[in-house]
Structure formats: structure tokens, C-alpha cells
Image (spheres, rainbow, N blue to C red):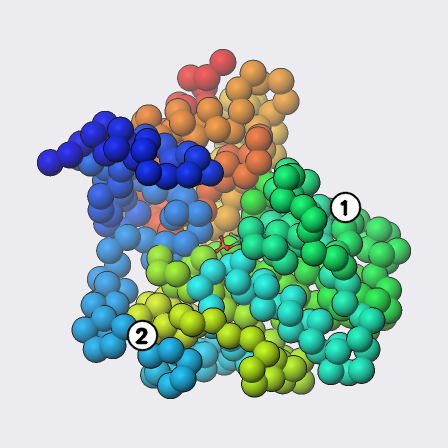
Amino acid sequence: MTDNAGWVERAQGPFFPNIKPAEIVLTHGEGCRVFDADGKSYLDLTSGIAVSALGHAHPALTEAIREQAGRILHTSNLYYNAPSIELAEKLVASSFADMVYFCNSGAEANEAAIKLARRYHHDQGDKARFRIVSFEKSFHGRTYGALTATAQPKYHEGFGPMPEGFDYVGPFDLDGLAATVSRATAAVIIEPLQGEGGVNVPPAGFLARVREICDANGALLIFDEVQAGIGRTGSVFAYEHDGVVPDIMSLAKGIGGGLPLGAMVARGDVGKSLAYGTHATTYGGNPVACAAGNVVLDTIRAPGFLEGVRAVGEHLASGLRAIAGRTKRIAEVRGRGLIWGAQLADGLGFNAKDVVNACRARGVLTHVAGLDVVRFVPPLVLTEAEVDEGLEVVEEALTSLS
Ligand SMILES: *Cc1c(COP(=O)(O)O)cnc(C)c1O
């Protein structure tokens, strides 16, 4: 049996250097725990960046995938398949949307959202209305449209020229937004809770003002719920907290429970502009991925499940705040449901990555959101006992550094 060191050595050869995984090889998992090739176990407070919503080797999820894989793996969009129809019905029933487009990732869902927004105005005869407005610190994905909407210069560097027609405003800058959105704006795209940018929760009333500014200018509103959607914030969709309804929404990450699945959903009068032949992807609506998605949706919508997410999330947040009080090494704890960021205090001499490494060495997986925020996006099935176990390690790791 090859151990961590053996695999990691082999991994140094065949990959592009664009990723830099920790030097462990994960072999399997169960619930909120994963195991590496040396047999060491870890408490997983990242769920593979907010993906494994039901944890690892979830029995119903595994069975649904196994069952569907034994029937048919792929049908293409030349034919219907039952799991995708069922999942589309569930997304429509539990959101503002009337129409669903399935794809394979968050970036793809945002590409579809941007294309739909432009095409909608084109169909209205408003062909000059193509500009997309996004916010600094946002993250929308790495393909060209989504990347251009991602208002963080470090992700653009060396990849220009970027596609035309994108404008940026400061995070939560309403005056900037009002000054930027115009009759040339096709859509404003925003994460209702910023994930990668530092787990930034908008101030109360902010999203409502964004909606008003869009409406006043005839622009569409796109919510990127790739990270914040599907139960992550303690409601099925993050937009429910503020009661602000977008026109288009992108989903991915948690929706497939670990299989590659994305979706772009929209109101019907907007969605009809994604007319026959305008957009498609080979794997869209893959029956195995959608079979997984059905288990995820059924699980998070079951009575009591999201109350559990909110309760465990509050337990995690109050534990982090207690650590902040004791150690003075955390300046702020931000989040909602089961997405939390611990902003490190200034002048510590170490960064979030160091905390993540120190936690991992002690058997707990966490993640960063930028340089100075430690991010917690655990499986939604995390228990309070697991929170306590994880926080003990986080506090130890935090105080071990200097
Ligand atoms: C991760 C993420 C994306 C990109 O998703 P991919 O599946 O990596 O393409 C887009 N938007 C948000 C908010 C994300 O967190």
C-alpha cells in the first residue's frame, strides 16, 4: 500500500503547478471525518470548499449514486432523464425560479447567467445594454466571463485582454453602485454572502437597496449562490434571509453533494430568452449528478434539518467568539448558518494559512478566505460534539503560533 509520502512524491511529476494541495492523500471518509493514506483521521470543517454538504459516504447519497450508475450514466440533452426532471421540479418548488438549466460547475452557472442577462435585453430590443456590474472581493469562477466578473485583480493578472462590458464597485458600496448602474447595465451580479472574499455578510438592508437600484435602471439582478446556497446559510437559499429576490441565480458546490453539478435558475419571463439553440453543455443534467442532487435537496428540505444547521452554526460561532475573547487572536467572527469566517487580529506575525496548517497537523481541516480569514464550511450534518472537538483544536493551533 502506498502511503502519503509515496503518493505525494509521484504527484510532483504530472500536474500543472496551478494547485498546491496539502501533502496528504485522502482515501475515504465517513460523516464529517476523512482519512489519509497513512490511516490518520481528520475532522472535516471544510467539506471540500462547501461541497460535501451531507458529509462523506452518506448512505442515502451513496446508494442513489450507485443505483443510478447501474441504470444509465449519461443521456445527453437530446433525451430527458428522470433524475434531472425531479431535481428541476424541486429547485422550482423551493425557490423564486420557474426555469432551470443544469451544468457542471459554479463558473459555468455564472457564464450561463451572464449570457442569459445579455440575451434577455437583446430580445427586448435593447442591444446596447450589455454591461455587467460586480463587487470587489467577489468570486464568481475562473472561466473568462465569470473571471471578468470576479473583481479581484490578482485573478486577472496575465490573462488579458478580458471580455468587454464589465464594471466594478467597492464591496457594499451603494453610492458606487448607484453611480455605476445605468441604462447600459444588463445585470448586477452579487454573492448574497461573499465566500472566498472573506465571508462577508452584507449589512441589513443592503441587498434591498441593490434590488431597488437595479429596478430603477431596468437592470437584472443575479445572485451567485454557488457557495451560499443549498442550506449553507441555514435556509435553502441565502436570499431568503433578506427577503430580496433576484431574477437569476447560480448554484453549484453543495448541490451535487460532491459530484460535479451546477445550475442556473431564473424567473420565467427572463428565462425564456435562453431560447432553443442559444446555450448548452454536453453533460448538463447528468443523471448520476442529478440523482445525487435529489438526495441533497430532499435531505436539506426535510423537517428540522435546517433548524439543525442554524443551531450547530450558532454553537460554532459562539465557540469561535469565546476563543476570540480568550486568545485575542481573532478580531471578528462573521457568517451565518454553517459558513463562518474568523478574521485574525492585526500584527500576529502569522496568517490564516499557518492556522490551517497547524489545525491540519492536529487532525482538523479548515480553510482560508484570503490572507487573514480562517473559513469554516463544514458538512451540514456536523454535530455540536464535533464542533466542540474541532474548536478545541482550533484554539490550541491558534495559541501554538507566534
Ligand atoms: C466556488 C465559487 C464559484 C466557482 O465555482 P466552480 O465550481 O469552482 O467553477 C463561483 N461563485 C462562488 C460564489 C463560489 O464560491
- The single residue placed furthest to the left in the displayed view is 1
Disc 2 is placed on an element classified as loop
Residue 78 appears left or right of 187: left
Position above or below: 354 against 160 = above
Residue 96 in view, yes or no: no
* Residue at (40, 27) in percent of width and height: 357
In-image side of 257 versus 90 (left or right): left
Front-lying residue, 364 or 316: 364
In the rendered picture of this protein, how many numbered marks are placed on residues? 2
Residue 256 in percent (x, y) is at 38, 63
Q: 380 or 126, which is in the foreground?
A: 126
- In what element is the residue under mark 1? loop
The answer to whether 231 is drawn above or below residue 323 in the figure is below
For mark 2, does the 10 Å Cα neighbourhood hold few (<14), some (14 to 19), or many (20 or more) residues? some
Could you tell me which quadrant the N terminus lies in? Answer: top left
First along the sequence among labels 1 and 2: 2
The quadrant where residue 57 appears: bottom left
Residue 151, horizontal then vertical, whole percent? 69, 47
Q: Which residue is mark 1?
A: 170
Rendered image quadrant of residue 97? bottom right
User: For the residue marked with disc 1, what is the amino acid?
Assistant: Gly
The residue labelled by disc 2 is: 74
